[in-house]
Image (cartoon, grey):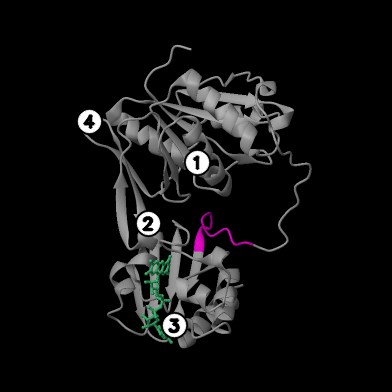
Amino acid sequence: MNLEKSILVIGEHRNGILNPVTLELIQKSRELSKNSGHKVYTLLIGSNIKEIAEETSHYDVDKMFFVQDEKLEFYNTDAYTFVVSEICKEVGPDVVFIGATPQGRDLAPRLAARCKTGLTADCTELEFDEKGFLLMTRPAFGGNLMATITCEKHRPQMSTVRPGVFAKGKRASKTFVIPEEIKIDLTKTIIRGRIIKQEKQKKESANISEAKVLIAGGRGMGGKAGFNLLTRLAELLDGTVAASRPVIDQGWIDKSHQVGQTGKTVRPRLYIACGISGALQHIAGMQESDFIIAINKNEDAPIMKIADLAIVGDVHKILPEMISRLESKK
Ligand code: FAD
């Protein structure tokens, strides 16, 4: 294959739907390529995935590869590592981006070892320096400092990237490329395990990264009971409940709701922060929200400085008032 200097995005999908992190990585790659001149390539792996490859080609990519085989229906470490490493041999990408999802976190270290290169996991910022080295930034030492890492001597430069950190690109009505199927002979590798059935998780897990409206609560909500107010407000605004870390530590709500450096990064259209002080580690996860409302009894709390609308007062008075006004409109 005669290919140019490229960034290869390893896409992810489930039940015919692309994982949003794939679209975030395509868009970030396109943004980086404007100065660096890289081509943006995407790879999808699975079984019967021509349609989803076609759908992906509505986003701004220079090449769209897909590998399909019955044995690739479910994620499998051995099979997927083999496929991506074979593609890397063919394509010779300068950079590989993988979503820091459970699948990506499993695949990336194996792949890096197979390609004899380095890996920076869980990146939150990416840019090229003037020499063309990728500067990969990630929280280090439990989020107390940010480390910027380069991989100068080995290729590809490889990162996993936190979902929700970068914006998704817009779907165009036209397709940018015709997807190219690549055949990989899976009999040439040993696949040690096989998933025969996948069941939906019984435990409900909040998808705060995708929510358009988030009603977030902090220690100022006073306890588990205070969160009933947030749940009701979320119902009325078609939103999802989110939380700061101490709330999770206290067991008021489960970890899937946590926003921040050690939780999830969110960018909803509306973020209502109730009884949250606005510590750096919290703000890191929500500052890209389109519109922020903060309710806090302390007008000097840091969250009030970044809020578009800062309401000084007691959440236990303001939230019931908001709820009753919204209920009266329904
Ligand atoms: P507090 O800081 O205690 O703030 C409570 C706020 O509620 C105060 O501003 C108070 O004025 C207000 N309040 C109290 N009562 C009321 C009332 N009745 N009405 C209105 N307002 C009221 N935090 C995260 O959120 N996410 C993370 O991912 C995260 N990662 C971290 C990683 C590391 C390595 C470290 C060291 C810390 C991390 N933290 C994280 C914790 C962070 O530093 C803060 O401690 C935390 O965000 C504070 O949570 P909070 O705002 O709910 O509580």
Q: Which mark is nearer the camera, 1 or 4?
A: 1
Q: Quadrant of residue 158?
A: top left
- Tell me the distance, in whole angstroms, between the alpha carbons under discs 1 and 3: 40 Å
Task: Report which residue position mark 2 lands on.
Answer: 288
Give the mark nearest the N terminus, 1 or 3. 1
Q: Which mark is nearer the camera, 2 or 1?
A: 1
Query: Is residue 72 covered in magenta?
Result: no
Amino acid type at mark 3: Gly
Q: Which mark is nearer the camera, 4 or 3?
A: 4
Q: Are marks 1 and 3 in contact (CB under 8 Å)?
A: no
Amino acid type at mark 1: Pro
Question: Can you give x and y, in whole percent of width and height, for residue 261 in the image?
Answer: 40, 61
Q: Are marks 2 and 1 in contact (CB under 8 Å)?
A: no
Read off the magenta span. Answer: 205-213
Q: Are marks 4 and 2 in contact (CB under 8 Å)?
A: no
Question: Can you give x and y, in whole percent of width and height, for residue 166 in the image?
Answer: 41, 46
Task: Report which residue position mark 3 lands on.
Answer: 220
Task: Report which residue position mark 4 lands on.
Answer: 131
Q: Residue at x 41, y 33 (%)?
A: 117
Which residue in the rendered view is the most extreme toward the left? 130
Assess disc 4: are there few (<14), some (14-19) or many (≥20) residues with their C-alpha within 10 Å of its C-alpha: few
- Tell me the distance, in whole angstroms, between the alpha carbons under discs 2 and 1: 29 Å
Q: Which mark is residue 109?
A: 1
Give the mark nearest the N terminus, 4 or 2. 4
Q: Looking at the image, which is closer to me, 194 or 269?
A: 194
Q: Which mark is nearer the camera, 2 or 3?
A: 3
